[in-house]
Amino acid sequence: MDEWDVVELPIDGSLDLHTFAPKEAASVVRDYLEACDEKGIREVRIIHGKGRGVLRRTVHAVLEDHPLVAEYRLDSGAGGWGATLVRLRP
């Protein structure tokens, strides 16, 4: 993706990272969490896939240090551990 390309994401509490380059993941997650906060969305699902866990570790590193994040955990639902559920602070 070129630095001038703009991708419009629906801010609905679910972010699928499969459409982004791995090097963009951290900034996309940060921006998405801030957009959810602005819209009053407190529960966020980030889909990172299963694979070797590289993207999951990147996502969790962002969540660990992000001031909006109250807690996060791997999704135990139908998607299994290919997604992380995040609760934002009020």
Image: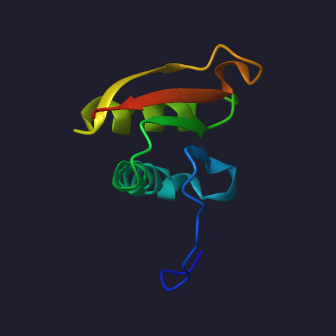
Residue at 55 percent of width and 19 percent of height: 74
Find residue 44 and report its horizontal and vertical position in percent: 51, 37
Lateral position of residue 88 relative to residue 19, left or right: left
Coloring scheme used? rainbow
Find residue 11 and report its horizontal and vertical position in percent: 54, 56
Residue at 50 percent of width and 51 percent of height: 25
Lateral position of residue 3 relative to residue 30, left or right: right
Find residue 3 and report its horizontal and vertical position in percent: 48, 80
Q: Which of the pair 79/50 is nearer the observer?
A: 79
Quadrant holding the C terminus: top left
Quadrant holding the N terminus: bottom right
Q: Which of the pair 8/53 is nearer the observer?
A: 8
Lateral position of residue 90 relative to residue 77, left or right: left
Residue at 63 percent of width and 38 percent of height: 47
Residue lying farthest right?
Answer: 78
Lateral position of residue 79 relative to residue 16, left or right: right
- Numbered marks: total: 0
Find residue 89 and report its horizontal and vertical position in percent: 28, 32
Residue 6 vs 56, above or below: the answer is below
Residue lying farthest left?
Answer: 67
Residue lying farthest bottom?
Answer: 4
Residue 18 vs 66, above or below: the answer is below
User: Which quarter of the figure has residue 69?
Assistant: top left
